[in-house]
Amino acid sequence: MCFGIPRLAVALARLDDPTLRTHPVAVAFAHTSRAMIHEVSPEAEEAGVVPGLQADQARRRCPSLRLVPPNPTRVAQAHHALVPFITPIAPIWESFRPGHFYLDLTGTTRLFGATCDTTMRLERDVSARLGLQAVAGIGTNKLVAHMASSLLTPPQLCDVRAGSEQDFLSPLPVSTLPGLRGPGGTALQTRLGDLNLQTIGDLSDVSVEALEAVCGRWGYQLYQWARGIDCLPVIAPEASLSLTHSYLFEPDTIDHDRLIGGLSCLLDSLCHDLRRQHRLCHRLMLTLLYSDQLTVQRSSVLSTPTHWEVDMFPSAQTLFRRCFQRRVRIRSLIIRSNSFCPPPEQLSLFPPHDSEGPQVQPRPHRLALALDRLHTRFGMKIIQWGRSHMATHSDSIAND
């Protein structure tokens, strides 16, 4: 099953402010005319407002457009609020963007009944308790389920029966394939359009040899997709190929101490997850979102894979200096690690010659492990490093 809340940021804005339900809505900062539109409501989309458009252009196309500022914290809270509804019915589930999940319901029929009935109960519970309208697609794999859910408006459900995948996909445009929606798929869409391959059914009529000759490495993948074949499994969060954490500054800031404090909060959360999952981080990626919607992203490879804050902080601070090159306020920080390696299991058989007693971990490592036990029991905010406290304390003063 592919389950999600379409246009989550717009849905949350309308939930918080019911007066927005009768107006076209777009998510963007209202205090600058060059702000980029992140998400739009169906009414705004019908008026010609699309994501990526500048705010002043969007207002000219739709004079009644209401702009609401992005709220990553609210979106993250809503995303986490959906998880308790999913875990009781899905042994394995995967989140691929905020408010959207893949659920593997294999083997749950005897427990919960037919998959269609389970999906309807999930939609009903989310609507009743959270006030959010969802869509869901059911299929034999992630591709078909995702395509089924992307064609719906909430609250709806689409069940694609086994064996009818190719018939379901054939009339759909090629541009609806999930792998062709990103920036990297634009050139491939243009190439397929030049060959007059407009629908997925057109792709299914072409041999795999011809597709590979024209599309290169994408040829075999397109051949599989056109027949509704997708072998990718649903990946549990613990086995995810990346870890991402974000920190939102309220209000936007340019204060160096608060920025470093926010960066330290991100490292605390990232290293806590790495130690819990028994992983070492090998590559860090830092993203800065400025108030004017400009995004700057830098990455670096750690000389020694680690999951300790004290070892990772110098590299993270260097990344921050490389990103922070403008005198413009910062809206949020995002840190991501997508390269892991397992910790070494083999210990040294003999201690070094110069050691006289048993080997003990360095004090910062022992302190981090002690904090992990507190964070696991009481939450990440119960006690923090001094650098982290600079950000949280400044934010609380600003909010007061």
Image (cartoon, helix red, strand yellow):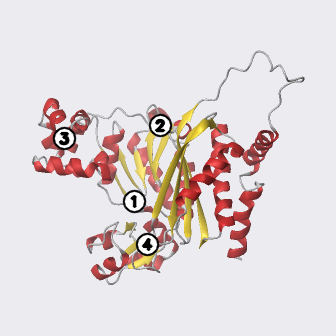
Residue drawn 40% across the image and 62% down it: 7
Closest to the camera, between mark 2 and mark 1, is 2
Kindly report the distance in space between the C-alpha atoms of the residues bearing marks 3 and 2.
27 Å
Query: Could you say whether the residue bearing mark 2 is in a helix, strand or loop?
Result: loop
Residue drawn 31% across the image and 68% down it: 50
Q: Earlier in the sequence, mark 2 or mark 1?
A: 1
Closest to the camera, between mark 1 and mark 4, is 4
Kindly report the distance in space between the C-alpha atoms of the residues bearing marks 3 and 1.
25 Å
Residue drawn 10% across the image and 46% down it: 195
Q: Is residue 244 left or right of residue 231?
A: right
Is residue 358 shown above or below 163? Answer: above
Kindly report the distance in space between the C-alpha atoms of the residues bearing marks 2 and 1.
22 Å
Q: On the image, numbered disc 3 is attached to which residue?
A: 167
Q: On the image, numbered disc 1 is attached to which residue?
A: 6
Q: Amino acid at mark 1?
A: Pro
Residue 235 is tagged as 2
Residue drawn 35% across the image and 32% down it: 231
Query: Could you say whether the residue bearing mark 3 is in a helix, strand or loop?
Result: helix
Q: Tell me the quadrant of the picture where the N terminus can be found.
A: top left
